[in-house]
Amino acid sequence: MNLTLKVWRQQSADAAGSFVSYQAKDVTPDMSFLEMLDSLNEDLISQKEPPIAFDHDCREGICGSCGFLINGVAHGGQRGTTVCQLAMRFFKDGDTLTLEPWRARAFPVIRDLVVNRSAFDRIIQAGGFISAPTGSAPDANSILIRKEDSDTAMDAAACIGCGACVAACPNASAMLFTSAKITHLNSLPQGQPQRDQRTLSMVVAMRNELFGSCTNHGECEAVCPKRIPMEFIGKMNRDLIRSVWRRHREPLVIPSVAQLPSADDSNE
């Protein structure tokens, strides 16, 4: 089948961008979307034209590297599917497809369909870790974990950080991503020592990265290739309220008599 692609081309972060039309010919239904772009890039290179830049790595829906908007929908609109997993059988001969990068202030365009998602890395650096003693790995049964907690942690850990939730949200919010990373560790016994500090640090880091606020549109959950549920946002908000409340409830340190200023000191 033959397709018309309107692709956002932008040479650098500082350059102006625009849509350029291309013809993708002899596309087979068994091709993935990225394989179709590979074929188109081979044609462009043979014609001495610059290839279309796009992110990719594993091409198995695991790494979260790939991702852009197809006809305005993150990852192309197939439920639970990344761009690299999207098969061309879902399109028809003669279709016109518009390809553009994630649109978010926190994800500046690097080139064409590639955006800078290092803001996600800084959110994880703010609290995505646990304290653990060095040495050999403990036995699997040394720390008992309820099945409900382990299931929740595993569901949250499924987030691959692709950024589709941010691109789909009208406010460019990163709440679904941040809540998944927080819930992953906050649900486990190993994550309890830093639970309050982790929640505060990661939420502050998220807000410092120019992401918008969540207004419960639900677009993030709809386009998430790993189907991360919005209920994790509620869990994060509850943990945030708990951590703020506990910080304000810290015991007041009353100075001793020896630490109080004397009358002579006050007259100086």
Image (cartoon, rainbow, N blue to C red):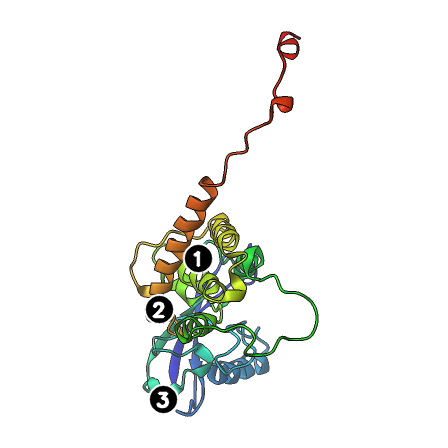
Given the image, on which type of amino acid does mark 2 rest?
Answer: Pro
Residue 168 visible in the current orientation: yes
Q: Where is residue 222 in the image (x, y as percent from the top left)?
A: 32, 70
Mark 1 neighbour density, 10 Å: few (under 14) some (14–19) many (20 or more)? many
Q: Which is more N-terminal, label 2 or label 3?
A: 3
Q: Which of 149 and 210 is in front in this view?
A: 149
Q: Which of 1 and 87 is in front in this view?
A: 87
Work out how far the residue at label 1 is from the one at label 2, CA to CA, in angstroms. 21 Å
Residue 127 location, quadrant: bottom right
Mark 2 neighbour density, 10 Å: few (under 14) some (14–19) many (20 or more)? some
102 sits left or right of 266 in the view: left
- Quarter holding the C terminus? top right
| Labelled disc at residue 123 | none
Q: Height in image: 122 above or below 71?
A: above
Mark 3 neighbour density, 10 Å: few (under 14) some (14–19) many (20 or more)? some
Given the image, on which type of amino acid does mark 1 rest?
Answer: Ala
Work out how far the residue at label 3 is from the one at label 2, CA to CA, in angstroms. 28 Å
62 sits left or right of 69 in the view: right
Q: Which residue lies furthest to the right in this view?
A: 135
- Quarter holding the N terminus? bottom left
Q: Element at badge 3?
A: helix
Residue 75 location, quadrant: bottom left
Read off the residue under disc 3.
89
Residue 110 visible in the current orientation: no
Work out how far the residue at label 1 is from the one at label 3, CA to CA, in angstroms. 30 Å
Q: Height in image: 69 above or below 263?
A: below
Q: Position of residue 20 (x, y in %)?
A: 44, 69
Read off the residue under disc 2.
229
Q: Element at badge 1?
A: loop
Read off the residue under disc 1.
104
Q: Position of residue 203 (x, y in %)?
A: 47, 52
**Nearest to viewer (mark 3 / mark 2):** 2
